Image (spheres, coloured by chain):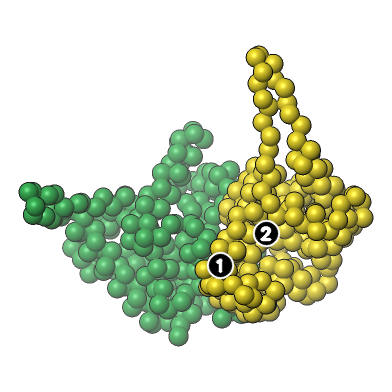
Chain colours: A green, B yellow
Amino acid sequence: MNKIITIGREFGSGGREIGRRLAEELQIAYYDHEIVLELVKRTNFTEAYIQQIQEKQPIPIFPITIGRTFSPQINPIMEQRNSVFIDQSNIIKEIAEKSDCVIVGRCADYVLRKKEPLRLFLYANMDFKMARCREKGNEGECLTDKELKQQILAIDKGRSKYYQFYTDQRWGDKSNYDLCINTSFIDLKKLVSVLSQMIEKYP
Amino acid sequence: MNKIITIGREFGSGGREIGRRLAEELQIAYYDHEIVLELVKRTNFTEAYIQQIQEKQPIPIFPITIGRTFSPQINPIMEQRNSVFIDQSNIIKEIAEKSDCVIVGRCADYVLRKKEPLRLFLYANMDFKMARCREKGNEGECLTDKELKQQILAIDKGRSKYYQFYTDQRWGDKSNYDLCINTSFIDLKKLVSVLSQMIEKYP
C-alpha cells in the first residue's frame, strides 16, 4: 500500500511549506492546489468558484413539512458543492492509488481513512501565524494587527466548518490525527528534516 | 540550558513506558514516581496519601460573605494539597537544574515553562487504552469492558481537573504542547526510536 501523508493545518502555521518540503525530502508526490486544477478540468467551474465554495461554510437545507408530507427542498448551490466535494474526493482517491504522496487539506485524512494515511495536523500560536502572514506578504499587507487576526480566525473557521460538515469530525481535534505539531518554536526546515526521518520509520 | 522533555499522557496511552524508554535511549535522567518518593522524604505524608491527593479533583473553597465582610474560610485539606503542589514544583525545578531529563506528568510542562521544555502529550483511542490496561494486568483485571472504560475516563478526568486547577490551562489541549502523539497505531519501541532522533534535532 502506498505511503500517504495528509496534512491538516491552521492558516499561517506553515502547513503548505512543510508539506511541499516534506514531499521533496521524501521524494514523493505533493498535492495541494493541483487538486483544484484537476477539478477545473473535470467540471464546468472556474478555479475561483471552486476555491470560493471550499472556503465558505456549507449551509445544508432541511426538509419543509407540509401537512404530514415531507417535501425535501433541493438547494442547487448545496447540490453543486456536494458534487464538487465528491469529484474532489474521487481525485484524491485516484492520487492515493498512484504513488506515495503528501496531500494538503481537503479532508484527505477522512476521504482516505480506509488507506490508513499518516495524518498530521499543524498548528501554531497566533503571534507566530500573524508574523508569518506578514512575512509572506500575500495576506494582510494593509491590515492592522486586529484585522489580520480576525482574518486568520475567519479562514480557520471556514476550514473548520467545511471539515465538520463533510466528515462529521472536529477539525484540529487531536483524536482525528496521528501527530499534531506546534510549529511556533521550531525552524520549519529543521522540522521537515526531522519529520521525514520519522515518517520513514512510521508503520 | 538543560534539555527537558515533559510528558503529559492519557491513562493507558503508554506514556510512562515511552518516557522511560526515551530517557534510556537518550541516556538522560527519568522522573516519574521518583518525585513522589522525594516528596515523602520532605513532608510528613505517606506515599499513598500524596498519590491520593494528586489523583482527586482539588476543591477550592470560596470566601463566605457575612454582611459586607469577607471572611475567607481556611480549608486545611486544600491548604495541604497546595503545599504538596508547591513542594513538588520545587523538586521539579531542582531536577531540571541538575541535568537533561524526562519528567512524566505533574504539570511539569507548566511548572518549567520558563525553561521552555519540549512538551509532549500522548493519547490514544479507547480500544487501544483498554487493551493496554488488560495486557498490563495491573488495572481492570476483574472489570467488565464498561467498568474498565469508566475507570480510564475517571482517571483522566482527575488528571484533567488537577492540571486545570494548578495551571489554568486545559489538559490535553494541543495549544499547550509542542507535539501530540497518537500512540494507537505505532509500536511503542519504534516510536521511541523515532522520537529520540527527533528530540536530538529539536531546538
For label 1, the residue is B147
Label 2: state its secondary structure: strand
Label 1: state its secondary structure: helix
Residue type indicated by callout 2: Gly
Give the percent coordinates (x, y) of residue B199: 72, 66
Chain under numbered label 2: B
Give the percent coordinates (x, y) of residue A97: 38, 82
Residue type indicated by callout 1: Glu
Chain under numbered label 1: B
**Quadrant assignment, res B38:** bottom right
Which residue is the extreme one toward the front? Answer: B142
Figure check: B24 above or below A170: below
Residue sitting at 70 percent across and 74 percent down?
Answer: B138
Which residue is the extreme one toward the top? Answer: B68
- Characterize the local packing of mark 1: few (<14), some (14-19) or many (20 or more) Cα atoms within 10 angstroms: few
Answer whether residue B62 is visible to the viewer in this image.
yes
For label 2, the residue is B8
Q: Quadrant of the C terminus of chain B?
A: bottom right
- Characterize the local packing of mark 2: few (<14), some (14-19) or many (20 or more) Cα atoms within 10 angstroms: many
- Mark 1 or 2: the one toward you: 1
Which residue is the extreme one toward the right? Answer: B41
Residue sitting at 31 percent across and 70 percent down?
Answer: A89
